[in-house]
Amino acid sequence: MIISRTPLRISFIGGGTDLPAFYRREPGMVVSTAIDKYIYITVNKKFDHWIRASYSVTEMVESVDEVRHDLIRESLRLLALDGGIEITSISDIPSQGTGLGSSSTYTVGLLNALHAYRGEYADEHRLAGEACQIELDRCRKPIGKQDQYIAAFGGLKSIQFNPDETVYVDPIICRSATIRRLEESLLLLYTGRTRSADTILRQQTRLTAIDRGTEARARKLSELARDLRRALCENRSDVVGELMHNAWETKKHMAPGITTEEIDSWYDRARAQGAIGGKILGAGGGGFLLLYAPLVHHQQIIRALPELRRVPFHFEPQGSKIIYIEEPSPQPRTHGLEADTAPMQAHSISAEAVSAVLEGAGAA
């Protein structure tokens, strides 16, 4: 059995500039961080030739072509795995429509587990690149590249997307006190509204390609992401809120559906109680509201938004990793004959994670 653990993410500024409609003309830039909320994938050898895939439903099929879950099907095809395998998953956070990059997190974690199942190591660039290939090229999803890269690499990163399809992933280098101030100034609030990002992203892609105003807004978002990277590297965390506010005021005009009257009301109420900036995570329309506010104002913001649920979190320095491998140990000999069965030897075991995965397999 193999178990991978892959972090979800929050994106501060730059979402949309990772879409091909923009970065193929000029480089895009996103500043994101992985957080300590995860998707776990288990991969296990099945005793027969069937494929079992368990997520919100359970599939039991004889061939890869019959698998309905497109990310699982294309991952198995890419790695030439054709049967005798079972795949399950669980998530710390609702895995659809919340704006935390769950689809790409799932894909990166699945690929990591499948590579380990094949007995091979896949580094961060390979995992992110293959996840982009599956989601953008094979499944034709109207998404960008930021989620795959932050899921694979983890940490607080600036990510640049280049016209030649290369991607530069760089850590934000600053004092640890700057990271602590940034982390403690953030509020993550669940709106209870989930949505499909595809419609919004298709509209944003179309408008970025044909409308100069939308293209100019995307360019401004890329510039604000660079400003944020520079500010953090100079340990000026006090300007983060205002940069996020400027970016949100720009982002919400990129396509219909990014914001709603309800979202605008939540954001305005939060600002009235001391929040400096913020945004709806992901494509927009629902999911999580991220706010930047001095810690002293957090409780009054929470009281002003009783319909939203606070989700505590911390930054996660690591990307996708294999947390459990169970493999055969050398077979003991009995009276000179091979034993019929081999005991299993476990490596890199996290007992809590293994227990959670095995008990909740199929819940995501």
Image (cartoon, rainbow, N blue to C red):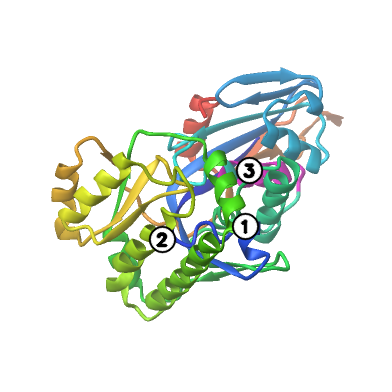
Q: Position of residue 182 (x, y in %)?
A: 31, 65
Q: Which label sits on residue 166?
A: none
Residue 218 higher or lower than 193, as above or below: below
Q: Are marks 1 and 3 in contact (CB under 8 Å)?
A: no
Taking the image as shown, residue 245 lies to the left or right of residue 82, namely: left
Marking on residue 210: 1
As for residue 110 lying within the magenta part, the answer is yes
Location of mark 3 (residue): 107
> Magenta region: which residues?
105-119
| C-alpha separation, residue under disc 1 versus residue under disc 3 | 31 Å
Q: Nearer the viewer, mark 1 or mark 3?
A: 1
Label 1 near label 2: C-beta < 8 Å?
no
Circle 2 crowding by C-alpha within 10 Å: few under 14, some 14–19, many from 20: some
Residue at the spot 67% in from the left edge and 53% down from the top edge:
127
Q: Quadrant of residue 315?
A: bottom left
The residue indicated by pointer 2 is 250
Of label 1 and label 3, which has the lower sequence position?
A: 3
Front residue of this view, candidates 32 and 256: 256
